[in-house]
C-alpha cells in the first residue's frame, strides 16, 4: 500500500471516530393512563385519589419543573376543580384535595391505549367518534380525546374528571 493510500485510510478512520451514532431520546418521565400516572423510572404509581400536594410535588420532581399555574374553577359540573398546569401541556385536576383527572396536549407524553397528542387520526387505534359542542370526541377504555379542527389529529386527551363545558 502506498504512503498516499495509508494517509487516506488513516484520515478516513480519524474522521469516522468523530462521527457519533444518534442516540434515542430518553423515555418521557411519566406515562398517563385511565387510573392516573405511571412514572417510567419506578414501579410505583400516582393513581386518582392521591393527595394534591404530594401529586404536584412528585410530578414536578419527575418533570424537572413545577406547574406554571394552579387555578380553581368553581363553575364545573362536578363541583370546583383545581387545575395544576405545566408548560408542556399537562394539566392535573384535583377536587377536594384529591387527584381526580388529567388533560394532556404534550405529544412527548405517552398515553395508554396507543394515543399521543398530535397523533394523526389515521394512525389512531380503532375508536368510535361522537360530535359534541367541543368538536369531534372519541373514547376508549376510559381514555377520551378531542380531534383538531378538521379532524386531522388528536388535539388533547384526558382521563378522570375534567371541567369541560358542553
Image (cartoon, rainbow, N blue to C red):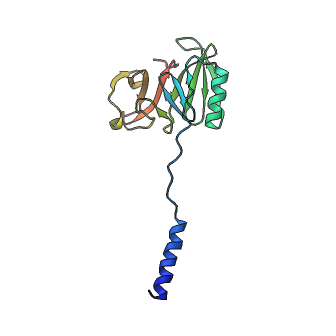
1 and 137: which is toward the camera: 1
In which quadrant is the C terminus drawn?
top left
Residue sitting farthest toward the bottom: 2
Q: Is residue 67 visible?
A: no
x then y, percent, for residue 63: 61, 36
46 and 1: which is toward the camera: 1
Image position of 141 (left or right of 79) = left
- Which corner quadrant of the image does residue 131 belong to? top left
x then y, percent, for residue 121: 35, 35
In which quadrant is the N terminus drawn?
bottom left
Image position of 122 (left or right of 66) = left
Residue at point 50%, 56% (across, down): 22
x then y, percent, for residue 97: 64, 16
Q: Is residue 17 visible?
A: yes
x then y, percent, for residue 81: 59, 17
Residue at point 50%, 33% (across, down): 105
Residue at point 47%, 78% (across, down): 9
90 and 9: which is toward the camera: 9
In this rendering, the count of numbered labels is 0
Image position of 9 (left or right of 81) = left
Residue at point 53%, 29% (across, down): 38
Amino acid at each position: 500500500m502506498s504512503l498516499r493510500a495509508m494517509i487516506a485510510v488513516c484520515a478516513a478512520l480519524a474522521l469516522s471516530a468523530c462521527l457519533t451514532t444518534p442516540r434515542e431520546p430518553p423515555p418521557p418521565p411519566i406515562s398517563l393512563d385511565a387510573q392516573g400516572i405511571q412514572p417510567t423510572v419506578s414501579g410505583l404509581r400516582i393513581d386518582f385519589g392521591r393527595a394534591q400536594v404530594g401529586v404536584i410535588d412528585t410530578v414536578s420532581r419527575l418533570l424537572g419543573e413545577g406547574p406554571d399555574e394552579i387555578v380553581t374553577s368553581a363553575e364545573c359540573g362536578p363541583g370546583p376543580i383545581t387545575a395544576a398546569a405545566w408548560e408542556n401541556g399537562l394539566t392535573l385536576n384535583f377536587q377536594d384535595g384529591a387527584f381526580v383527572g388529567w388533560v394532556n396536549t404534550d405529544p412527548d407524553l405517552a398515553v395508554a391505549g396507543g394515543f399521543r397528542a398530535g397523533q394523526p387520526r389515521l394512525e389512531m387505534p380503532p375508536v368510535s367518534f361522537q360530535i359534541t359542542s367541543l368538536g369531534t370526541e372519541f373514547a376508549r377504555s376510559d381514555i377520551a380525546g378531542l380531534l383538531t379542527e378538521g379532524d386531522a389529529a388528536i388535539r388533547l386527551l384526558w382521563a378522570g374528571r375534567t371541567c369541560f363545558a358542553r
